[in-house]
Image (cartoon, grey):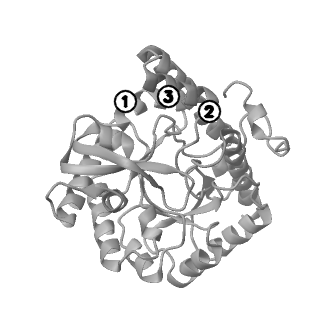
Amino acid sequence: MCRDTASYLGAAPLKHIKSGKSLPLRALGMNIWGQVLGGFPRSREQRHNMRDVERGDASLHESTTTLLLSASAVIGVQEAANLRLVTDGMLDWHDIFRPFVSAWRGVTTDGLLRYFDNNFFYRVPVFLDRPDPAYFVWPPRLKTLSRVAEPWPMKVVVPGPLSFLLMSKNASGLSKEELGAAIASALQMEVKAAERAGAAAVQIDEPILSDQELSRDEARFGVELVNSIVSQLSVPTTLAVYFNAPRDDIYDEILEAKTTYISIDVADSPARSLDLLKRKGMPGHKPILGVIDARRLEDDDYARVKEWVAAVAKLGFEEISLTTTTWFDVIPYRFSLRKTFLLGLYVERLANELR
């Protein structure tokens, strides 16, 4: 764990967290398990590191060492919380698109835009041609950081092709459908390379599917692209939808995804999300529930989380994963660590109380 990790957890300690590793979930008799959905905010050291890299004031060795230490810290926190899958925190990513824009020929960037309704901005990708990977983003990270994470398995996260397409500018001369297929093809090459490099799971983030103005045809096209990406993978896969509950007709399209799991943001719209699950279920999939609010500083209320999870458990699912509503992009670093521990604590309590 990182230097003085406990000091980042805020003034009110999590008294229920014990030192050392907690009991493995499979020994608790309930198949409820936890994972953080995506990235972590940068620590002070990593913020300074990225600033120094951009200014040319840090060597490659210095910047890599600082990143490795920062990633080791967030991996260690997830392991201490006994989450089943861990991420490396994506601490050197400016936004979810930028690493892939940098890795692909035929793509550049434009100005900054707000990322949905968050106080967070992304640099708009501009497609000048079909994206052509010059190198892959995840394999070198996995080869280094999976050793840090052992024996915990690591998942990789990539932006969904529809979100990528609709949140970019198309200056390629290709139709929307042609460019979407080209983006999906590049992402398919990326995740296949990640699987070969040791990825234990692949998550595809499609927050655009929660956009209330999205057309059903666009959603159908997006799910088809996701299916093309996961079609040749053997590891578990997730389609992650967050920031809101999707409309009924969009949810019907989401259910056509060929992924192992579908992640739904419960905490941001609990009534609508639970209503969708009760009326339509999640046939052919295992649910991942976003119950820890990654955009609020306050501790999440355990009684409410238990109520949500109990309602879903009554629907007959044999396995439920709990996660954060989205990435920890908009809250301070120390609160992201605290909420990670909170997630692990709630998973353990629920596994005991709901079995």
Badge 1 marks a residue whose secondary structure is helix
Q: Is residue 43 visible?
A: yes
Q: Residue at image x 84%, y 41%?
A: 11
Image quarter of residue 305: bottom right
Give above or below for 20 relative to 250.
above
Relative placement, left or right, of 225 versus 238 is left
Q: Which residue is mark 1?
A: 140
Residue 253, compared with residue 119, is above or below; it is below
Q: Tell me which label, 3 or 1, sits earlier in the chain.
A: 3
Q: Position of residue 25 (x, y in %)?
A: 66, 50
Could you classify mark 2 by the number of other residues whose Cα lies within 10 Å: few (under 14), some (14-19), or many (20 or more)? Answer: some
Give the number of the disc on residue 50.
3
Q: How many marks?
A: 3
Residue at 27%, 43% in the rendered image = 108
Q: Nearer the viewer, mark 3 or mark 1?
A: 3
Residue type, mark 1 in image = Pro
- Residue placed under numbered mark 2 in the picture: 43
How far, Cα to Cα, is label 2 from label 1? 22 Å
User: Element type at marker 2?
Assistant: loop
Three-letter amino acid code of the residue under disc 3:
Met
> Measured along the vertical axis of the image, is residue 296 above or below residue 43?
below
**Side of 226 relative to 56 (left or right):** left
The residue at the point 31 percent across, 43 percent down is: 101
Name the disc covering residue 69, or none: none
Instruction: Answer with left or right where residue 247 lies relative to residue 256.
Output: right
Which amino acid, mark 2? Ser
Q: Earlier in the sequence, mark 3 or mark 2?
A: 2
